[in-house]
Image: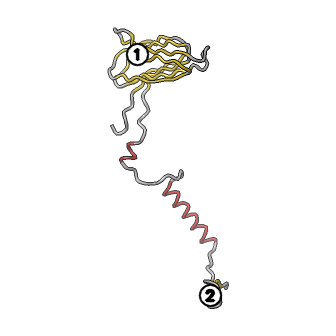
Amino acid sequence: MKLSRLGTGPHLATRPAPRWSRTVIFPMTVAVFAGSIALCGASGASALPSSPVTASLTKPAAPKIYMQRSGTGNKEIASIMVPPKSSVVWRFDCQNAPKQRGTFVLSSTEQGRSADKLTDQTGLGGGGQKPFMQSGRYSFGVNTSCGWTVTVESTPLPAGK
C-alpha cells in the first residue's frame, strides 16, 4: 500500500493514498462535461428561462412579398394591388453604371391619380422604403442607368404587438 503525507516533516501523520481508477475518473469527467453542456448549451449561452424581455427582442416574422422586380435602367412596372400596411422597398447599385455614380428616381402612381415621387437619390448606390397604410392599385416608374430592385412587401409589426 502506498502512503501519502498530509504535510511535510516527521511529526505529521500518513494515510493511504487515494486509489482513483479510470473506471471512476472517466465517467465523472464525462458527467461534469455533459452537465455543463446541458446548462449552457452548445454555444455556451446561458440556459436561463425565457422572460418577457427576452421574448420581446425576437425578430418579427419575415415580410410577405407581394411584388418584386429587378432590372437595369428605366422601367415602368405594371400596376398591382398594394394591400394596407405594406411597404415599397428599393435598392439601387451604380457600381457597374457607365459613370459609376448615378441617379435613381422611383415614383408611384395610384390608379386615377397623378404620379408621386417616392425617392430621388444620387450616388454609388442606396435604398429606402415607404410605408403604404391604405390599399390601392399602384404602378411604379424607375428612372436610372443603374441596377435596381423594387419590392412591395408586408410591413412587419414590432415584436409584441
The three-letter amino acid code for the residue at tag 1 is Ile
Q: How is the image coloured?
A: secondary structure
- The residue most toward the right is 2
Rendered residue at 64%/84% (across/down): 8
Q: Which residue is mark 1?
A: 80
Rendered residue at 65%/87% (across/down): 9
- x%, y% of residue 6? 60, 83
**Count of numbered tags:** 2
The three-letter amino acid code for the residue at tag 2 is Thr
Q: Is residue 11 above or below residue 19?
A: below
Q: Secondary structure at mark 2?
A: strand
- x%, y% of residue 151? 46, 22
Nearer to us in this view, 123 or 75: 123
Q: Is residue 53 above or below residue 66?
A: below
Disc ID at residue 14: 2
Rendered residue at 58%/65% (across/down): 29
Q: Quadrant of the N terminus?
A: bottom right
Residue 122 in the figure: left or right of residue 87? right
